[in-house]
Image (spheres, rainbow, N blue to C red):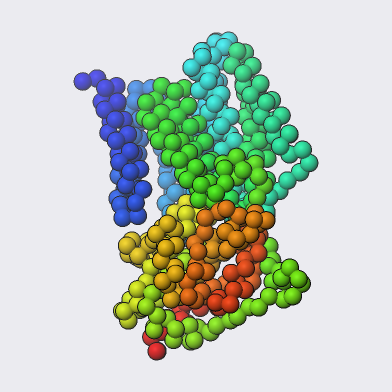
Amino acid sequence: MMRDDLIEIAYLVAAFCFILGLRWLSSPRTARKGNLVAAVGMLIAIVATLVDGRVVGYTWIAIAAFVGGSIGALVARRVQMTAMPQLVALLNGLGGGAAALIAVSEYHVAGAAGEERLGAVLAVSVMFSAIVGSISFAGSLVAFGKLQELLPGRPITWPAQKLLNGLGAVVVLGLAAYASFNINDPLLWLAAVLALLLGVSAVLPIGGADMPVVIAFLNACTGLAAAATGFALGNSLLIIAGVLVGASGTLLTQLMSKAMNRSVANVLFGAFGGGGGSSSGVSASGEALPVLEISASDLAAQLVYARRVMIVPGYGLAVAQAQHPVRELADLLIERGVSVAFAIHPVAGRMPGHMNVLLAEADVPYDQLLEMEEANPDFPQTDIVLVIGANDVVNPAARDDENSPLYGMPILEVDNAENVIVFKRSMASGFAGVENMLFHDPKTRMLFGDARKSLTQLVQDVQAV
């Protein structure tokens, strides 16, 4: 059997691993196994590629593998779970940038071989990968900056923003088309640079509240750019892997948009999300709205005598790294005969599945996690709901206030429970910058302070009751 045949068989096995891994990643119960299988598939793909006869030297490959592997290992060990969304954005951007660089390289090789114009398949593949990869790279860096709070979370807009972005897209496409028929390296580099600027200008106007959708969308773009690069290189595995990433990212984008009751176009072009402004706490008549507080000791006394408790985690839980104390609290209540479950909103946190991953890290049993559709019917029979660091996903304005930007977004209807306890540092509004009237509801009590410290104290008080 020829070496090329063995390589294709290895690619087929790797592709099977990718598909199986993606399938298992769809469930928290099998996600760890899916990640391992996908990693094995990638190892097989790398080894198969290294034995390809077209590889002319291994020195630079070895250097790059050592540097990249070292950085990857360091990042994997040191990055906290709270920073996982921005890490995903960053790694996704690097994938898009790599695809764009490979496309530019193939374009240069064609020119160096004396070709004056690209063939149809190569032209579409190279141009698509160079442009979309560049947009994904720059856009992902902006998303990283917003999530890391290096950039303002609010939408950053400017006059004629959409018109200028549209004109920029037309210019980029025009340059790419011309470069296909007249091979000219500087021309393609110019198109790539303009695509980078387009990626920045496209993501800056998107508010931080929409970053989960943006990450999923840019992930789809990176996957499609990689698939196009696969066509340019004649690499079947890269095509399959890119299509898998592109398809899953597209589906996730649609699901996340649906969870927010907004179209993808509205997310990408609506300039929504205020970046966590302050809450006014004032009614329409100008009167100060009531805010009722509760202490950890009083809450502990209520919890141990409750029949049913629901916990709603949010980004504040991740920031405080309070996943372990909340699991300890849940275990203590279950030991006392209290029914405890976690209600997970699809867009809670800063990336899809953020809360599931966070709670899995703390070894919260999967059967305690309820999706929004499962949790909402249970709230009327729930004695106490603990809202820990969540805001927009429990805001009744999304259901009741037609003038609210959140109106129509499905929420966790915690206000239907008998009692609601909100863990927050202050009365500041959520990432969308929208006032949350839940905080002023007569059945709501606020437990102010760092979530980790509050939960740790609560655990001690429950043990003392």
Q: Is residue 181 left or right of residue 80?
A: right
Q: Residue furthest left?
A: 1
Q: Residue furthest right?
A: 159
The residue that appears at 65% across and 64% down in the rendered structure is: 435
Question: Where is 432 relative to 157, above or below?
Answer: below
- Residue 292 location in percent, x, y? 60, 80
- Residue 176 location in percent, x, y? 62, 22
Residue 7 falls in image quadrant: top left
- Residue 266 location in percent, x, y? 61, 43
The residue that appears at 66% across and 29% down in the rendered structure is: 169
Q: Let me know if residue 87 appears in the view.
A: no
Q: Is residue 371 left or right of residue 94?
A: left
The residue that appears at 38% across and 68% down in the rendered structure is: 341
Question: Camera-side residue: 267 or 155?
Answer: 267
Question: Where is 219 relative to 155, above or below?
Answer: above
Question: Where is 441 relative to 171, above or below?
Answer: below
Q: Let me know if residue 463 appears in the view.
A: yes
Question: Camera-side residue: 455 or 182?
Answer: 455
- Residue 252 location in percent, x, y? 46, 44
The residue that appears at 63% across and 38% down in the rendered structure is: 199
Q: Is residue 357 left or right of residue 36?
A: right
Question: Camera-side residue: 373 or 198?
Answer: 373
Q: Is residue 272 left or right of residue 104?
A: right
